[in-house]
Amino acid sequence: PARAEGGTAAAEEVHIEVLHLPEACSPKSKKGDLLNAHYDGFLASDGSKFYCSRTQNEGHPKWFVLGVGQVIKGLDIAMMNMCPGEKRKVTIPPSLAYGQQGYAQGKIPPNATLIFEIELYAVNKGPRSVEAFNQIDKDGDKKLSELEISQYLKEEFARDGKKRHPSAHDEILADIFKKNDHDRDGFISAKEYNVYQHDEL
């Protein structure tokens, strides 16, 4: 109730409650990191659950890049500076969720305030980080060849252990070049790769 008295300004913020904080809290999540988390979503109005990551995708936690709009803005904000093993309960106002239009497919009515219970499992260097670029760029020439990216995809696929059709590798590789090789020279430069602007750079 205290929040409502503060007028609309206070209601436009994400309210974060830390439910569990591990003793070793590192690394902390930042924009561009690849996060692995489970989360349940509830409507603040009646407490009904509209989303549960444990019942989707065969119960695997979700992977997404933080701060780039892969999830609603409120979750991008709510999951900053979070460490592996941490649990949070966050309240997200409509303006940072699905707004006036709601999200019918997700059973979210217009102007809904959302509550998420989040458990973060892993914080990795994001796919667009400088470290990832350097890791893929085996010969250090500051551009990524088809061979280098192909090798990287093979390693990534082997690591997550999912069964994929052999053609998936070629399709993803072609898609990466289609979307990133803007000057069509057969290489993806650091600029084309769009290395995220990191504070430490």
Image (cartoon, rainbow, N blue to C red):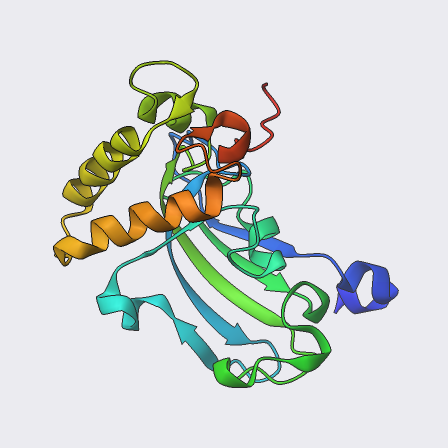
- Residue 32 in view: yes
Q: Residue at x 53, y 48 (%)?
A: 79
Q: How many numbered marks have been drawn onto this rendered protein structure?
A: 0
The x and y percentages for residue 148 are: 28, 28
**Horizontally, is 137 left or right of 69 in the view?**
left
Name the side, left or right, on which 9 lies relative to 96: right
- Residue 20 in the image: state x and y as whole percent: 43, 47
- Is 55 located above or below residue 67 in the figure? below
**Residue 48, image x and y in percent?**
49, 83
Outermost front residue: 185
Whether residue 35 is visible, yes or no, is no
Task: Identify which residue, 86 or 28, lies in the foreground.
Answer: 28
**In this rendering, would 169 be left or right of 95?**
left
- Residue at point 46%, 24% (across, down): 130
Residue at left offset 39%, top offset 45%: 176
Residue 141 vs residue 107, the one in the foreground? 141
Task: State the image quarter where residue 58 is shown.
Answer: bottom left
Residue 127 image position (x, y, % from top left): 41, 37
Identify the image quadrant of residue 13.
bottom right
Above or below 53: residue 159: above
| Closer to the camera in the image, 34 or 38 | 34
Check the image and report above or below for 166 versus 200. below
**What is the residue that sits farthest to the right in this orientation?**
7
Q: Is residue 76 above or below residue 126?
A: below
Query: In what quadrant of the picture does the C terminus appear?
Result: top right
Residue drawn at point x = 48 percent, y = 27 percent: 189
Could you tell me which quadrant the N terminus lies in? Answer: bottom right
